[in-house]
Image (cartoon, rainbow, N blue to C red):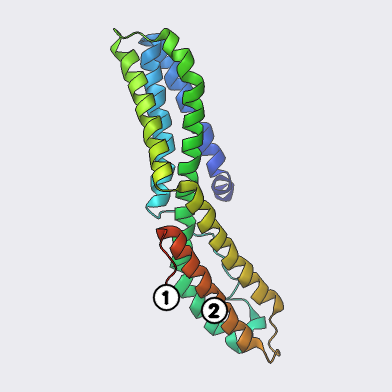
Amino acid sequence: MRNWLKANSKSLGALLVALGTASAFMVVGTKYGWWQAGVAVLAVSIAATLAPILFSFLNFGDLNAPGNWFSTASQLGAEKARVEDHYSRIQGTLRFWKNKAAAYHRLHLARVYWSLLSAVALPVLVQHFDRTNKWSVLFMTILTTWTGLVVALAYTFKAEEKYQGLRQQESDFYDVSRQLLDSATPADPELREKVNKYIETVSSIRRTARRVETGSPPSAL
């Protein structure tokens, strides 16, 4: 049961948010008014958008690491301990890449979703807008301000570019790790050389990821 919940946590979370949003809209709308309901739905939706982004930016996400890839890799022979030690040093970097890639991806998706929602909803809402109704004014103010903020942040931080860049470096690391494990044999006289090349390639990947993250020019190192 616990494994099932963990595997389906995202789907369950989305379902709970949808149910919470629909419930808030119906309960508040029928009891207090539909503009009030709209404000309640906006609050729930903004919280549901913001929470996963902050969760990833704060580096809370667990690393779906290759677990026992290296610890059980008998084909690495005498180089096994060296590769394990190298992996232990880069593990924190991998977690950082994963969390930041997820955060930028979610920020980019938030920009797309909220821009589309505003573009479709505003022409309809304007026709029912009542300047004398404070809830109507509050709803329109929150919607436009939040949409503008999300778009501005995603553009300023280059969310789409950084997501693609960090995700590519993460993928490159796992690709070169698989290549090493697939080609290594204990009796291979070039095994040490392959491990040296692997470590150099990972270093190059890390330098590229650093440039993606900071948007800085290439380092002399």
Q: Secondary structure at mark 2?
A: helix
Identify the residue under disc 1.
Answer: 220
Q: Answer few, some or many: residues within 10 Å of disc 1's Cα (few below 14, many 20 plus, some between 14 and 19).
A: few
Q: Answer few, some or many: residues within 10 Å of disc 2's Cα (few below 14, many 20 plus, some between 14 and 19).
A: some
Identify the residue under disc 2.
Answer: 199
> Of residues 107 and 57, which is closer to you in this image?
107
Q: Is 71 positioned to the left or the right of 183 in the image?
A: left
Three-letter amino acid code at disc 1? Ala
Residue 166: image location, x then y, percent: 50, 58
Residue 50: image location, x then y, percent: 40, 39
Residue located at (31% from left, 19% from top): 138
Quarter holding residue 187:
bottom right
Question: In the rendered image, which quarter contains the C terminus?
Answer: bottom left
Quarter holding residue 196:
bottom right
Residue located at (48% from left, 22% from top): 22
Three-letter amino acid code at disc 2? Ile
Q: Is residue 207 above or below residue 148?
A: below
Residue located at (42% from left, 36% from top): 151
